[in-house]
Image (cartoon, grey):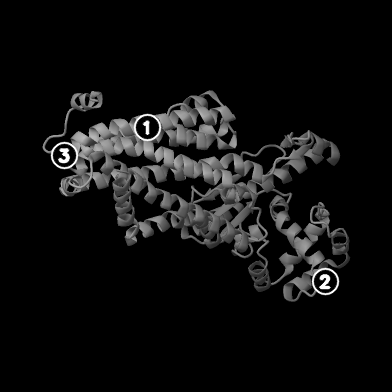
Amino acid sequence: MANKTLLVAQREYLENIRTKTFWIGILAFPVLIAISLGAGFVLAKLKQTQNYAVLDLGTERLADKIEKQARSGDMEKLARLLAKSDGLGGVMKTLQAELGSDLAAIGAGSGTDPAAKPPEVPAAVQEKLFDAIMKLPAGDVEALMAEQKSLASAQKYRRKSLDELGLAGLPAAEQEQQLEARLQRGELFAYFVVGKDPLAGLDDFRYFSKNVTDSDLRTWYERAATKVVQDLRIAEAGITREVATRIKQEVRFQERKRRADGSEAPVTAADKGVGWAPMAFVYMLWIAVFTAAQMLLTNTVEEKSNRIIEVLLSSVSPGQLMSGKIWGIGATGLTLTVSWAICALIGVWAAEQLMPGADLSSLAAARDPLYLASFVIYFLLGYLLYAAILVGLGSVCNSLKEAQNLLQPVFVLLIIPLVSMMFIVQEPNGVVAKVLSYVPLFTPFTMMNRAGGPPEVYEYVITTILLLASVWLAFKGAGKIFRVGVLMTGNPPKLKEILGWLKQA
C-alpha cells in the first residue's frame, strides 16, 4: 500500500517540476519581491531635480537665511569630506583653498575610531562654504553636484533666484504674477512666498505648486524656515541660545534592552528586524500554502473531469490516490519554499556585496536557521491541513467553476491571518494572538507570526499537538468524501449528503 502511495506521489511531483512554467513561477515571486524593494530606490534616483523660486516680501532677507539652513546638512557633509580628503582637484580643490584653516579643526578631530562621534562642523564654516559655492560659476556647481553624491538636497532641489529669472527689481505683485506664469508653463515646480513679518505672524507664508501629491520640497523648506523663524523670535525675546535650546529639547527615551547578565544594551536594527521578520515569513507562508493547496484542488478536478482518475483507480485505492496526491504536491510546495529560502539567502548576500556600507542587520532573520526551520515545518503542517480539506472539496466537483465557488469560504478563512498579522506582530503574546494560535486553521500562520515574541515552549507543544490531530482528522474525513465523491458525476452532492458520508465507518 505504501509503495503505491509513493508511486502516486512521485508521479504528481515529477509531473509538476518537469514543466518550465513551474520553475518560472518559482523565480517569478523572488523577482517580484526584488523589483518591489529596489523600485523605490531606483525611481528615487531617476526623480528630476525640482526647480523652485522664493519671493521674499520682508526686509530681513529671510529667504537667504532659510536657504542656508536648508542646505546646512549638505554643507556639513561636504566640509567633512574636504577636511579629511587629500589630493582633491577641480572644484573641490578650490573650495579647500577658500576655507583653508577653517577645515583644520574638523580634520584634526577625525580620529581612527569609527565608533567615536565625529567633530561638529561649526555653523560659521557651513556658512562660508555655502557662500563659496554660491560664488562659483553655474557650470562648476553642476559639476560639483554630479560628482558629490552626498549633496542629497542639491540633487533633489534647485533654487532659481529672481535675478536668474529676470524678475529682480519688479514690484512684488508683478513678480508673483510672473512666478505663477512660469509655474503654469512648467519652468518651475513650485514657488514660495515668504511673509513680511514672521515675528508678528505667518499667515502670509504661502506655497504654490501644480503638483499637490508631492510634498517633499515643501516639507524640506518648511523645516528650515521653522528653524530660522524660531531663532528670530528667540532673539527678539532676549532668550539666550542655551536656554532656548534647553526649552526646545524634545524628550526622547533611549530604546534599551536587558541582557541575560543584567547589563543594559541599546536596541539595534537587528533586534527590530527580528521582531518584524515574522510578517515577511507569514506572507510567504500564506502564499506557499495557498498555492500548493490550490494546485492540488485544480489537479484533482481536472483529472476527474477528464476521466483520468478512473484509470488511476483501476490500479490504486481511493485512499492511496488521495494520499499520494497530497504528498506529491506537498513535495512540490516544499520545493517551492526551499527555493524561495535559497533566493532569500542569495538576496541578503547580494545586498551586502552591493551596499557594503549599509546597515543590513535587520535582514539577519532571513538567515536564522530557527526561522527557516519553523517556516518549513509550519508550511508542511498548514499545507497538509488545507490540502485535506481542498482535496475533499475537489473530489465532489465536476468542473473548475464549481471548485472555485467552493473555494471562496476557504479563501475567506485564509484572509484572517493576513489581516491580523500586523496586530499580532505588535502583540505577539496578546489575547488575540493566543486565541488564534489554538485554532488549527490559523495555527501555522499565527505561531509563525508570534516567533518574534516568542511564545512559551508549552504553547508550541500544545498548538503542534492540536495541529497534528487536526491534520489526522482532516485526512480521515477527506478520505471518506474522496472515496465516494471522486467517482460521482452529474450534479454535485448537497451538504447533507457529504455530512452523511463523514458519518460512515
Q: Amino acid at mark 2?
A: Ala
Q: Residue at x 59, y 34 (%)?
A: 454
Q: Please state if 123 lies on the left or on the right of 160 as rendered.
A: right
Is tag 1's residue or tag 3's residue first in the polypeptide sequence?
1
Task: Work out whether 505 lies above or below 151.
Answer: above
Q: Residues within 10 Å of mark 3 (few under 14, many from 20)?
A: some
Disc sitting over residue 441 in the figure: none
Query: x, y percentage for residue 51?
Result: 57, 59
Q: Amino acid at mark 3?
A: Leu
Of 485 and 282, nearer the camera is 485
The residue tagged 1 is 472
Of 277 and 2, nearer the camera is 2
Is tag 1's residue or tag 2's residue first in the polypeptide sequence?
2
Cα distance between the residues tagged 1 and 2: 80 Å
Task: Work out whether 432 lies above or below 97.
Answer: above
Q: Secondary structure at mark 1?
A: helix
Q: Amino acid at mark 1?
A: Trp
Cα distance between the residues tagged 1 and 3: 23 Å
- Give the number of the mark in front: 3 or 2: 3
Q: Give the image quarter of residue 346.
A: bottom right
Disc sitting over residue 487 in the figure: 3
Query: x, y percentage for residue 241?
Result: 84, 41
Is tag 3's residue or tag 2's residue first in the polypeptide sequence?
2
* Residue contact between numbered discs 1 and 2, judged by CB atoms under 8 Å: no
Q: Please state if 476 lies on the left or on the right of 123 as rendered.
A: left
Q: Residue at x 26, y 47 (%)?
A: 299
Q: Secondary structure at mark 2?
A: helix
Cα distance between the residues tagged 3 and 2: 90 Å
Q: Please state if 35 lies on the left or on the right of 357 as rendered.
A: left
Query: x, y percentage for residue 310?
Result: 16, 46
The residue tagged 2 is 97
